[in-house]
Image (cartoon, rainbow, N blue to C red):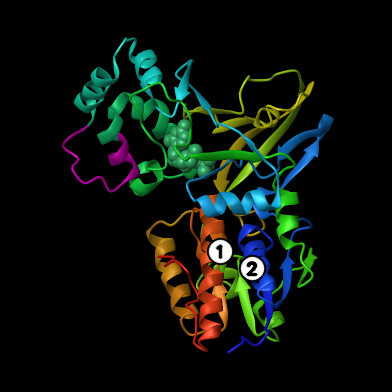
Amino acid sequence: MPVRPRHIAIVGAGFSGAVIARELAEAGHRVDVFDSRPHVAGNCHTERQDGDVMVHVYGPHIFHTAHEHVWQYMNRFGTMMPYNHKVKATTQGKVFSLPVNLLTINQFFGKTFTPAEAEAFITSIGDQSITDPQSFRDQGLRFVGPELYAAFFDGYTRKQWGVDPVELPASILARLPVRFNYDDSYFNHPYQAIPRDGYTPIVANILDHPGITVTLGVVKSRVDLEAADHVVWSGPIDAYFGFEHGRLGYRTLDFERQVHEGDFQGCAVMNYGDPNVPYTRITEHKHFAPWETHQKSVTYHEYSRLADPNDVPYYPIRLVKEKGQLQQYVDEVGKLSNITFAGRLGTYRYLDMDVTIHEALGAVRALLTAWENDSAASPFSVDPL
Ligand code: UDP
């Protein structure tokens, strides 16, 4: 039986909202997308600034994925340029290679270890009494031992998250590999790239479909959307409910923007592990586009702090208090129908771009299948808890 065309209202024009809008429009539905900001692409937004340098306005975004279909999706809407992300770290008065690899280990300890020797050494200094690491700290101490943990992880993480790493989940550290060879790529994924023209035109292209209207600079609340057959909410989940169980905590970022002549730091991202250096990292944006040449350079010194209500939310904190609040919101969602919560803000999770796109495609598949079968789709494609 053909599916009745529906009218869908989507809040948020980042990757989640845009991908869901596109797939629903291609399936014959009418989609209105709203975003409170004056641009699409959410925190992936890019624009050319001083001397035409492509700036990642909300901080560095490097596309990396192992999902073939997500890689194809990005390439359908823009030109992706090969880019192998490498990060350096300044700590204790020296510069090191990151993520922790054989060069880092040999330089840090003044050794000439082979891969096998380095692995045996790191195992010997790792705290093997921690058998089931639950916290970020335990994970760090077990896997790299106290010296490397202090130099690269403890100070950085206190600055980034504003709490003792003992309170943070081990999963945050699991984002970073430790390698016993000289591979210094920040990511392991087979596809790594940066869009030639930035992320914003890609999201605009995704949204460019006759079945989609986009309205920017408008704040929509739950009552504004009642006329739609279905709502997709990729804004903050607590905002949908008017913060009735309190505001979910986020870290926000302040960027101290500087413009320089020439090359400021010689790489795209330099992390700062020392606790007394107030910023976590410096991003030099032109190094994200090594295929371009610029005399001018734009840098961001990045400072992390707790988000106030008017700040841009970046990283969901997800500690015990927030998990409890999230549970209350998830319970509220269970009482609703004809709604999908999606993306980083809609599900209150620390998501990479590729996972966001992967989940958005999954959410649409579930929705279209439910409509075909005249049944209800789950409001979350992935359990947010
Ligand atoms: N991290 C750290 N030292 C570093 C880089 C990262 O301790 O030099 C920790 C920190 O807690 C951070 C997490 O690892 O939040 C994930 O780092 P990633 O570079 O993936 O963060 P993102 O680029 O998403 O901010």
For mark 1, does the 10 Å Cα neighbourhood hold few (<14), some (14 to 19), or many (20 or more) residues? many
Q: CA distance from mark 2 to mark 1?
A: 9 Å
Q: Which residue is mark 2?
A: 23
Q: Which residue is mark 1?
A: 360
For mark 2, does the 10 Å Cα neighbourhood hold few (<14), some (14 to 19), or many (20 or more) residues? some
SS at mark 1 in the image:
helix
Which stretch did the figure color magenta?
127-140
Q: Position of residue 147 (x, y in %)?
A: 32, 24
Q: Where, by quadrant of the figure, is residue 31 drawn? A: bottom right
The answer to whether residue 121 of the structure is visible from this angle is yes
Which quarter of the figure is the C terminus placed in? bottom left
What residue is drawn where x is 50% and y is 87%? 373
Q: Which mark is residue 248?
A: none
SS at mark 2 in the image:
helix
Q: Specify which label sits upstream in the sequence, 2 or 1.
A: 2
Q: Give, as a three-letter code, the residue at label 1.
A: Ala
Residue 20 lies, with reference to residue 317, above or below; the image says: below
Residue 206 lies, with reference to residue 279, above or below; the image says: below
Residue 379 lies, with reference to residue 235, above or below; the image says: below
Q: Position of residue 361 (x, y in %)?
A: 55, 64
